[in-house]
Amino acid sequence: MQLIASRPGLASFPDSEAPKLDVSVKTRHDLAADHLHAWVTFTLTSDPAILDLRATYRLVYRLRTKPTAPDARAFAGVNAVFNAWPYWREVVQNTSARMGLAPPTVPLLKV
């Protein structure tokens, strides 16, 4: 697993009231002869629009047999997200603290 991109954004410091947070996830994948490459992009946004954190991870899985395209898409959409989630939570915690914010708690991934 490799963090390949990270982009924090802070429009303004939040008031005393905690903003509502939303996490979205996008995945893509590429099949090679004996590897599956998966890219997972996590985005955390707030309402009101104060905070915007984004991170993309590249995960490489060694394959014994080549999966079908639908199976590879499903694997990237579930397993890669599951494997990268703890690292995403850590990026949110550390980045927001370095921005001078109280670190929001990103929940555990619900499967």
Image: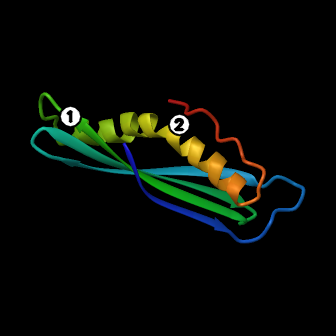
Residue that lies at the very extreme toward the right in this rendered image:
16
- Residue 104 placement (x, y as % from top left): 72, 46
Assign a secondary structure to mark 1: strand
Assign a secondary structure to mark 2: helix
Between 66 and 88, which is closer to the camera in this rendering?
Answer: 88
The N terminus appears in which quarter of the rendering? top left
- Residue 36 placement (x, y as % from top left): 22, 41
The residue where tag 1 is placed is 62
**Is residue 16 left or right of 80 when viewed as pictured?**
right
Position above or below: 9 against 60: below
The residue where tag 2 is placed is 86
Between 84 and 24, which is closer to the camera in this rendering?
Answer: 84
Identify the amino acid type marked 2: Pro
Please tell me the numbered disc located at residue 13. none
Residue drawn at the location 37% of the way across and 33% of the way down: 79
**Is residue 46 left or right of 39 when viewed as pictured?**
right
- Residue 13 placement (x, y as % from top left): 80, 66
Local crowd size for mark 2, using a 10 Å CA cut-off: few (<14), some (14–19), many (≥20): some
Identify the amino acid type marked 1: Arg
**Is residue 86 left or right of 67 when viewed as pictured?**
right
Local crowd size for mark 1, using a 10 Å CA cut-off: few (<14), some (14–19), many (≥20): few
Of marks 1 and 2, which one's residue comes earlier in the chain? 1
Residue drawn at the location 64% of the way across and 36% of the way down: 107
Residue drawn at the location 16% of the way across and 37% of the way down: 68
**Is residue 77 left or right of 94 when viewed as pictured?**
left
Q: Spatial distance from mark 1 to mark 2, Cα to Cα? A: 21 Å
